């Protein structure tokens, strides 16, 4: 059901044509107080024009209030910038599942793609690599990750909720769920065209290499390699691994462990910025050295919090909504703008340098990731632009009076209220 702030958003715009009876009842109750400041004639016209007499999909309508009933500032055709993981194909295996949102699902998302994956305790995403860089955020549980660096030295560690990892292109790696209940995580790749179906898998490679070559390569009798699977495993159920220190010791061998840390303990770092409205953590190659191709910002907006009007001069933004409810308007130039609603599991996207804001529209914290194909995080805010431009020049553009200009935040708040 709609919470109070959502009801307000429906009724503020005078929308009456609900497609579900329950929704209509809720809105009529709230409508009494909303929209009273509007001109009555305009309001009547607005209600008649916005009505939608034929029922659609009430559950989807409730989740997409700003599409069903756009704010009056929205205009023109703006390419869709939302895709929910909920409607992505789920590839189910014994041991877990995966689903992806790429440029094939979300056409505007050309620079980055994402995968949502679940592994049971013991479930393995098999040893593999790919031509894209992989950045990951742990959504749930615990996992053991392995890789070797470019010198062949091993890296093995355990990660928990909130932790990250990064594997550069061509670096072979694996992920395994740990007890008690495995893991769920988000992967982000620096290529919108990436596909989980097209990675270099150990089992797939061996199944497509002549067995006499494999036996000569391993210097073992052919019978010893004939037991290998004849097709890829991708995700499979295995026994839960033993103690971490033992896995690290055996993987390191005589070469020793890699000096590179491929994991990042996000919550061990203080927030980059904290205000009354929420907090932000920026993770890029300045504090997570190995992450050369992907930069990230983890944002928490409290109820009523606003990620201020801003843009990113250096890269497109790929978003993943971890929890809560929010909305974002993207101003797409030439008089075009669109507002869309987001909640847990949704992917959002903003093309390079297009202005946008994100608002918490729910009654709980809104937590989301901003991802960029870049070694560094960069943004510029409307407030810092206008407060660092000659005031008379700004006033001449927007008819703002001196008191308003002087009240603008000088230091970029990032999240409001400050
Ligand atoms: Mn991978
Ligand atoms: Mn942004």
Image (cartoon, rainbow, N blue to C red):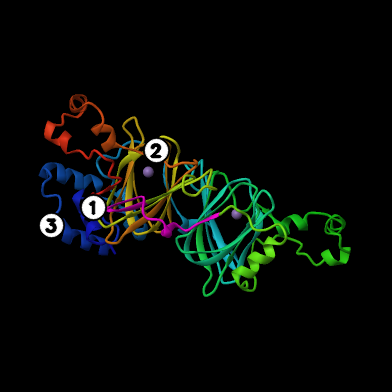
Residue visible at 37% across and 39% down? 379
Q: State left or right for residue 230 relative to residue 175.
A: right
Which tag, 3 or 1, sits closer to the chain's start?
1
Residue mark closest to the camera, 3 vs 1: 1
SS under mark 3: loop
- How crowded pointer 2 is (Cα within 10 Å; few <14, some 14-19, many 20+) is rated as many
Distance from disc 3 to disc 2, alpha carbons, whole Å, reads 41 Å
Which tag, 3 or 2, sits closer to the chain's start?
3
State the residue position of label 3. Answer: 32
Residue 56 in sight: no
Q: Which mark is residue 9?
A: 1
SS under mark 1: helix
Q: Is residue 279 a member of the stretch shown in magenta?
A: yes
Q: Could you tell me which quadrant the N terminus lies in? A: bottom left
SS under mark 2: loop
- Mark 2 vs ligand 2: CB below 8 Å: yes
- How crowded pointer 3 is (Cα within 10 Å; few <14, some 14-19, many 20+) is rated as few
Magenta-colored span = 262-280
The location of residue 414, given as percent across then percent down, is: 30, 45
Residue mark closest to the camera, 2 vs 1: 2
State the residue position of label 2. Answer: 312
Q: Is residue 130 a member of the stretch shown in magenta?
A: no
- Which quadrant of the figure shows ligand 2? top left
Which tag, 2 or 1, sits closer to the chain's start?
1
Residue 189 in sight: yes
Residue visible at 64% across and 70% down? 246
- Give whichever of 35, 131 is nearer the camera: 131
The location of residue 142, given as percent across then percent down, is: 51, 67
Residue visible at 15% across and 46% down? 44
Q: State left or right for residue 331 relative to residue 123.
A: left
Residue visible at 30% across and 57% down? 19
């Amino acid at each position: 059901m709609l919470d109070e702030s959502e009801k307000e958003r429906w009724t503020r715009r005078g929308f009456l044509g609900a497609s579900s009876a329950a929704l209509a009842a809720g809105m009529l109750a709230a409508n009494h107080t909303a929209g009273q400041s509007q001109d009555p004639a305009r309001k009547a016209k607005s209600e008649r024009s916005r009505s939608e007499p034929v029922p659609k999909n009430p559950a989807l309508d409730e989740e997409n209030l700003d599409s069903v009933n756009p704010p009056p500032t929205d205009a023109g055709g703006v390419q869709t910038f939302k895709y929910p993981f909920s409607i992505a194909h789920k590839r189910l295996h014994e041991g877990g599942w995966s689903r992806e949102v790429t440029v094939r699902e979300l056409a505007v998302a050309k620079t980055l793609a994402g995968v949502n994956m679940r592994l049971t305790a013991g479930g393995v995403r098999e040893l593999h690599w790919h031509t894209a860089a992989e950045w990951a955020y742990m959504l749930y549980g615990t996992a053991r990750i392995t890789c070797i660096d470019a010198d062949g030295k091993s890296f093995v560690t355990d990660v928990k909720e909130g932790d990250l990892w990064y594997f550069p292109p061509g670096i072979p790696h694996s992920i395994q769920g740990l007890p008690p209940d495995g893991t769920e995580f988000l992967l982000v790749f620096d290529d919108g065209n990436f596909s989980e179906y097209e990675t270099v898998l150990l089992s797939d490679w061996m199944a497509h290499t002549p067995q006499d070559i494999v036996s000569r390569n391993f210097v073992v009798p052919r019978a010893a390699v004939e037991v290998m699977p004849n097709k890829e495993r991708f995700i499979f159920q295995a026994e839960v691994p033993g103690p971490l220190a033992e896995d690290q010791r055996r993987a390191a061998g005589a070469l020793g462990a890699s000096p590179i840390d491929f994991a990042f303990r996000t919550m061990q770092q203080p927030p980059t910025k904290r205000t009354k409205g929420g907090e932000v953590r920026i993770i890029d190659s300045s504090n997570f050295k190995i992450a050369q191709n992907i930069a990230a910002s983890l944002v928490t907006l409290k109820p009523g919090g606003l990620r201020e009007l801003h843009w990113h001069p250096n890269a497109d933004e790929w978003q993943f909504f971890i929890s809560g409810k929010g909305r974002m308007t993207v101003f797409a130039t030439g008089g075009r703008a669109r507002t869309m609603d987001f909640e847990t599991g949704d992917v959002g996207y903003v093309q390079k340098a297009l202005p946008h804001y994100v608002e918490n529209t729910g009654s709980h914290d809104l937590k989301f990731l901003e991802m960029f194909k870049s070694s560094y995080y960069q943004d510029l805010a409307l407030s810092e632009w206008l407060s660092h431009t000659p005031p008379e020049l700004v006033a001449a553009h927007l008819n703002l009076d001196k008191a308003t200009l002087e009240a603008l935040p000088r230091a970029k708040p990032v999240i409001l209220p400050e």
